[in-house]
Image (cartoon, rainbow, N blue to C red):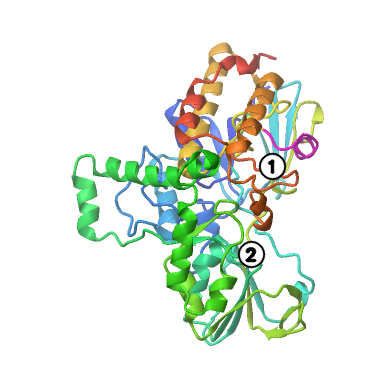
Amino acid sequence: MTPDHEIAIIGGGFSGIGAAILLRKAGFEDFLMLEEGDGVGGAWHWNTYPGVAVDIPSFSYQFSFEQISGWSRVYAPGRELKAYAEYCVDKYDIRRRTRLGSKVVAATFDDETHLWRLETADGWSTTARFVVGATGVLTQPKPPDIDGLADFRGTVMHTARWDHTVDLRGKRVAVVGTGASAVQVIPSIAPEAGQLTVFQRTPIWCLPKPDAALPGPVRLAMRRLPGAKRLSRLASQALVELTFPLAAHFHKLLPTAGAGERIGLAHLRRAVKDPETREKLTPRYALGCKRPSFSNDYLQTFNRDNVTLETTSIDAITESGVRTVDGTGHPVDVLVLATGFKVFEKGNMPAFTVRGAGGTDLEKFWEENRFQAYQGVSVPGFPNLFTILGPYGYNGSSYFNLIETQTAHIVRCLRNARKTGATRVEVTNEANDRYFRSMLDRRKHQVFFQDSCSLANSYYFDANGDVPFRASPTLETMVTSRFFDLADYAFADGR
């Protein structure tokens, strides 16, 4: 049976865009990219809240094969990342291979034909020989589990679905949450709001941000000077590698393990005037237990007269505001939910129903066997299915490095399938088990598995207490994706 497409890519963010471009470069032209939204860009299409920006230097947050010099800042604002996504889609002729408004709700593998059937929310369906899952993880907003949310009579919005028609001027605004998006949105709306109350459950480690505007002459020099873009990317990549992959996965082996915390605490002391507020903003867990943030104005925002930090737990949302467990009512006109996303939870891993060989359900497989995937790409029992951001795939470096690395792995499998005439490609149980054991063996050096992390309330941890990050330096991920043993996969021809 001939499929509608050789390859279906699910997701039109940078993961899907990067996979599509690299597939084309490798000679795979028959693919379709399916995207739920009405535009490409993924997180940068959906997230438009005030202050949204990339949280690693822009020189790293771009494809290695498509480096641009037009960023306005070291840490580019969200609108520039959205524009970069549109630029890549057009330059590499991906748009005509994209179907927008197509939310995939089910993927089913046919054991006889070796094809996947994909179904969308609007009743449309298609078939593909191979599927590349590129839906990411920070895509589905997570509402807080707080009583009474539906009863609130004011305006409610999640940071990931910002309503720009809402005027905050002079309003009583409440922000629930102090994660990465809150760190950006709070200082951006504080000058506008009449009163801003921030409800914090767990303080976040906030480090100074080495950000600056990139004036025209600097951008011109990066375009004109030989090696300038390469050098800036190299410096940026080194910074990123030191601050997460190495610091997180080899924490107990590094002599400078406490340096980041000292920098964060010094930043807090300089930024916040009131000792009581400063104490509330001081994390009680080790740096790295949960996603830290970089900002030069978040902490300073709590010096403003119109900003209040509330650390008493929320009891309920009422019709007119927020009630804390001490019985205090906080009147609110606009409620902003900075409560993050579903990550390692049902309904997001995977983001839709996936049934592999013999009707095996992927969500159930992970629930019963813990999250696992060979190099974060493939799961035994799910032939012809590859993921960009599977369990134990991301090591904490730039997402763009992840996209290129994982796609290199996928392309290697597809090329061998084409060479051998295989219609079914499946990672072996032995290879998957070996890789999973190797990741678990490296936990002893990671920052996540120390006692203080129990206080972090971190989305890094799944229901089993695992942290499905790839415990590898970036160079290792790049090498192994290109030179893994092809015998780790079974290639079969069922035609």
Q: Which residue is mark 2?
A: 202
> Of 95 and 391, which appears nearest the observer?
391
Magenta residues?
A: 362-372
Place of residue 452 in the rendered image (x, y in percent of width and height, measured from the top left)? 65, 54
**Where residue 344 appears, x then y in whole percent?**
69, 47
Lower sequence index among marks 2 and 1 = 2
**Which residue is at the far front?**
255
Q: Nearer the viewer, residue 245 or 93?
A: 245
| Disc 2 packing (10 Å; few <14; some 14–19; many ≥20) | many
Residue 8 visible, this orientation = yes
Find disc 1 in the rendering and name its residue: 466
Location of the N terminus by quadrant is top right
Identify which amino acid the numbered label 1 is placed on.
Answer: Asp
Type of amino acid at the residue the image marks with label 2: Thr
Distance (Cα) linking label 2 and label 1? 20 Å
Where residue 188 appears, x then y in whole percent? 47, 73
Q: Position of residue 182 (x, y in %)?
A: 55, 66
Residue 190 in view, yes or no? no
